[in-house]
Amino acid sequence: MQASDRFNINSQLEHLQAKYVGTGHADLTRFEWAVNIQRDSYASYVGHYPMLAYFAIAENESIGRERYNFMQKMLLPCGLPPEREDD
Amino acid sequence: MDDEIQKTQEERKKMEQQLASMNTVTFDTEFYSSNKFEGYEKSIPVNDDDDTFDTENEVARKMASFTAPKQFFKEVPRGAGEEDEPSGFNKPSKIIDREDDYRRRRLNRVISPERNDPFLDKTPGPEVRTYADVMREEALKRQKEELMKEIAKKKKEEQEKAADKKEEVEKPAQKRRNRWDQSQDEGGAKKAKAGSDWDQPDSTPGIGRWDATPTPGRVGDATPSVKKNRWDETPTPGRVADSDATPAGGATPGATPAGMSWDATPKLAGLATPTPKRQRSRWDETPATMGSTTPMSGATPAAAYTPGVTPVGGVELATPTPGAINLRGPVTPEQYNLMRWEKDIEERNRPLTDEELDTMFPQEGYKILDPPASYVPIRTPARKLLATPTPIGTPLYSIPEENRGQQFDVPKEMPGGLPFMKPEDYQYFGSLLNEEDEEELSPDEQKERKIMKLLLKVKNGTPPQRKTALRQLTDKAREFGAGPLFNRILPLLMQPTLEDQERHLLVKVIDRVLYKLDELVRPYVHKILVVIEPLLIDEDYYARVEGREIISNLSKAAGLATMIAAMRPDIDNIDEYVRNTTARAFSVVASALGIPALLPFLKAVCQSKKSWQARHTGIKIVQQIAILIGCAVLPHLRSLVEIIEHGLNDENQKVRTITALSLAALAEAAAPYGIESFDSVLKPLWKGIRSHRGKVLAAFLKAIGFIIPLMDAVYASYYTKEVMVVLIREFQSPDEEMKKIVLKVVKQCVSTEGVEPDYIRQDILPEFFRNFWVRRMALDRRNYKQLVETTVEIANKVGVADIVGRIVEDLKDESEPYRRMVMETIEKVVANLGASDIDSRLEELLIDGILYAFQEQTSDDANVMLNGFGAVVNALGQRVKPYLPQICGTIKWRLNNKSAKVRQQAADLISRIAVVMKQCGEEQLMGHLGVVLYEYLGEEYPEVLGSILGALKAIVNVIGMTKMTPPIKDLLPRLTPILKNRHEKVQENCIDLVGRIADRGAEFVPAREWMRICFELLEMLKAHKKGIRRATVNTFGYIAKAIGPQDVLATLLNNLKVQERQNRVCTTVAIAIVAETCSPFTVLPALMNEYRVPELNVQNGVLKSLSFLFEYIGEMGKDYIYAVTPLLEDALMDRDLVHRQTAASAVKHMALGVAGLGCEDALVHLLNYVWPNIFETSPHVINAVMEAIEGMRVALGAAVVLNYCLQGLFHPARKVREVYWKIYNSLYIGAQDALVASYPILEDDENNVYSRPELNMFI
């Protein structure tokens, strides 16, 4: 980055973006991105009641149970993170 | 709305429809509503009320008026000059120049040596000052002080005795002298009183002189009392004469307190006008050396007063180079300033030579006269000495040693890239100039040198230098250590020639360093406070805020215990100044560390038995806390009141006063809550107002005034009646402060709920008007304001008729300020309450009085008379009808007045009363006034011309286009040249008037005239004032609508070729407006055709117009998107960056406008052209591109853009990834939820689950 655009609006934009949890950056790994995707998805399912209802019918579970399951899955949605290969 | 306007508008509508039907070949009602302009504002409202009527079509009103994009309004201004910008022309101001004597007392304080930090785990050595030491010193000082007072008293008594004896011997002469002394003293006291603040009752220098009898040496030097001087020197008649003959003393830089005229040396000015008084005084004979002039330098040689002094300094006076200063050793900055000033004056006032006179005057027509025979040049010794300042012959002269290193008026180049050093700085930074080898210095010295360098850079350096230096100081603060740092910084802050900016920077350094040093500052707390406390009473708001910030940081760093230990000795300091600033500093500490933490200490201080000063300061701290933190005192209100309540019965009068004032401050801060906390003080307060007189009474009344509004209605009414007796008695008080307070209290009492109008009418009004509504009250600004406010408040209770009836006669009073006060009151009362209470008799008196006052005014800068006139006429409404001819006669008469102000005022009055004239049905009269105003359009004063245009506008607004005289077709051509006028007021009024005509009466004027106006308007789009630019844009729209787009467009397109960028920007806006008003299809073909001109400016102009155009037309853009796509394709592939940038912003507006309207195919096509630009680095281009992509997200949906994104998120090249992630992030923030459905499918691997099976579920 040049000295001149350290203070312009674009860098501010990036700074602003970095404040949100789900945003990414050039060094994001596949795993990290996938975790974000999963969590966003679950959050979306929980947030849209009709979706929950749909899943509940499909899985023959109660809506509350579905919601609970989704919330639980948000904890480690993709399993443990892979070993970081040192570079 | 007028009938004819409606009619013409209907005609216009018909014409538009015809126009549309001519094009019906391609006209498709599915896409076009039958009239695209429905919902557009068709006329400019007369005032803001108009547009509240028609709210039925709110949806269509989205674009209620033509407007330009915000960035245009922001962008256009600012040609080159910018008179309003604080340029480098105003000289940096020295703090000391604007300080009064009281504030200047800060310079008397000594930066105390550091103190022991009791929190360290070691016993202090004998050389370290502990708290006990400091307290002991203070006690000693107090004793000394008392002793001095005693001595002074004795001496005075003796002197009086002696004087009495003498008086008997030589009565007449002595009597004169006495009067001199007296008047001088009186003058001093009066001045002090005027400048004093009531809230700090003992801050008057007069009292201060008592409090702080100068300790021998220091204080005495700086605040020499007249008394002391008289003792030191035996007065000679010559001196008395001289003391009034050198008024220059007051005007010199580094002005000294009034008393200083004694030992201030005769300035050159004084010499130039030799006073022919009786005896030549010694002053004239000895041009004193510079050294003796300053009150500050500790080394003021007393010898300077003696006649034997020789003008040694005279030689150096001519060459005050920094080198010379170094040579001579300690020269204080003031001395230097004085020298610089005198040198300057001398240079300007030197006699002109014959050659110079020859060059000044023409060769012919002038004759050189011989001096008259009787002329004898003045040959006073003093003059001679000044005229020939050769040192030969004067006794004590010695040949100065030659100094090779001397610099002649050229500031020495600073070694090592240090910034320029001002002469004043040599004292502090001089050692930096010694070019010693840094290696040889001891580490401590090196450190010191480093600090000095950094400080100099902060103080005098360029911004980048300053920034790095500040950062280094902050980073290395702990390494440098608190001692070396503060020992360098704090003396700089005490420098008398400090400027605001410099102080700000140094204070900033302290602030930064404080953070880093934290508890290490403890030994230096008092030092810092000495320097920072004066900021708390600075007149500059920002300085006060800065001071507060530092002290609050300091108290957080050092902790409460250290702060109290540092300030405790100052609480009963003998100097009132010190106590005052300490109280304020304490209040800041309280707000920083919380009031509860400070309460026990405050309680102890307020009950101090030892000295009344301590109690006084303690109570004052409470007052300052209330002022500083406002309603946040509420939780602690009861304890604060309890702490100070005993002060109401204190034996010392000052303590009683400050207690009452503190209660007032607390009540003010707590309002409208917390009355229960004041229960305990009500009784003493009420007792107090019956037993006290004067200042104390005033303070008590003030407290009651603030407490009453907190009470319930019943109690308030009761207590008001109680206090009113005293108030009414004090109505007659001659004391100004008392008057102000009484007025304030009356206002507060009257405005509380429980007070009945009848009571006010019977018990208060008669006395109130008898004592306060007198001419003298109008002379003082503060009295004036307070009286008006109070009277208005009373009127709110008792009604208009009572108040106006009482003062209406005074409109004819012979004193103008008084009339103005009456007028202002009437205006406010009538504006608040209307005029329905006013009966016909009063009405007659009122109009009569107002006319008289209006005509008799000689100066009215605040427009009081004008506003009053307008308010009354508008309040009376139709009842003014009988008086209108008379009023108009006055106006006409005054329009013809010689004075520009009067003319302007008359014109302004017309615009105020135009609406009422219409209500009264005086249209003929208005027409007549219109003609008169028309005749005055040749007015040369822009302010007046602006007002005349405003008056014309007001008339046109109310009587309509057709009835207007002179007819519009005559009026408008007369306005066209006025549009050229650059004066803001003229421009604004003129464009409003023209816009109004263009809107409602365009058909009265030939098209050619409108074209001419269009050209003028282009220039006006550059106006500085936003209102003017907006009105211009509106007017453009109206004109284009009136005369059709073709001609206007042709000129505008031609205008794109001009060189000036601003002009082109204005033109593009105008084009877009025309397109919007006359629908885009009338403009687009010509515009797109213009893009073929192979000229950068023109093409960019076209693109910019397109961008604005699509921004304005919004949804309408869906019909044109296919038409312009090829053009945009071309532009987005152009080599020129600006092409691509502007095209991208056009795409953005287009995409946002047509979102959801089924133009996805074209948009995807355009996105393909926009996308390759994402790697641009120029900030404007990349911004435009990113915004275009954002626009696409809105129009096409997040999924489409995500698909574009995916290709680069994990690209092997980091640079690529960075850009793509940036796009992804803004996409994600904009449409997080929408992305869930369109993320790519990721396959699981052996350890992790990436798939999202839920999305595959299917019922």
Image: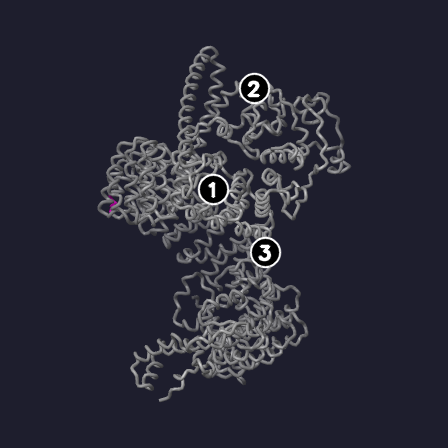
Residue B775 shows in this picture = no
Quadrant in the rendering for residue B987: bottom right
Q: Which residue is mark 3?
A: B982
In the rendered structure, which disc, 1 or 2, sits on the residue that comes first in sequence? 2
Q: Are marks 1 and 2 on the same chain?
A: yes
Q: Distance between the Cα atoms at labels 3 and 1? A: 53 Å
Badge 1: few (under 14), some or many (20 or more) residues near its Cα, within 10 Å?
many
Badge 2: few (under 14), some or many (20 or more) residues near its Cα, within 10 Å?
some
Region rendered in magenta:
B754-758
Q: Position of residue B1142 (x, y in %)?
A: 59, 71
Q: Is residue B340 magenta?
A: no
Label 1 residue SS: helix
Q: Position of residue B154 (x, y in %)?
A: 41, 19
Label 2 residue SS: helix
Q: Which residue is mark 1?
A: B528
Q: Are marks 3 and 1 on the same chain?
A: yes
Q: Distance between the Cα atoms at labels 1 and 2? A: 46 Å
Q: Which residue is mark 2?
A: B238
User: Looking at the magenta stretch, what is its main secondary structure?
Assistant: loop
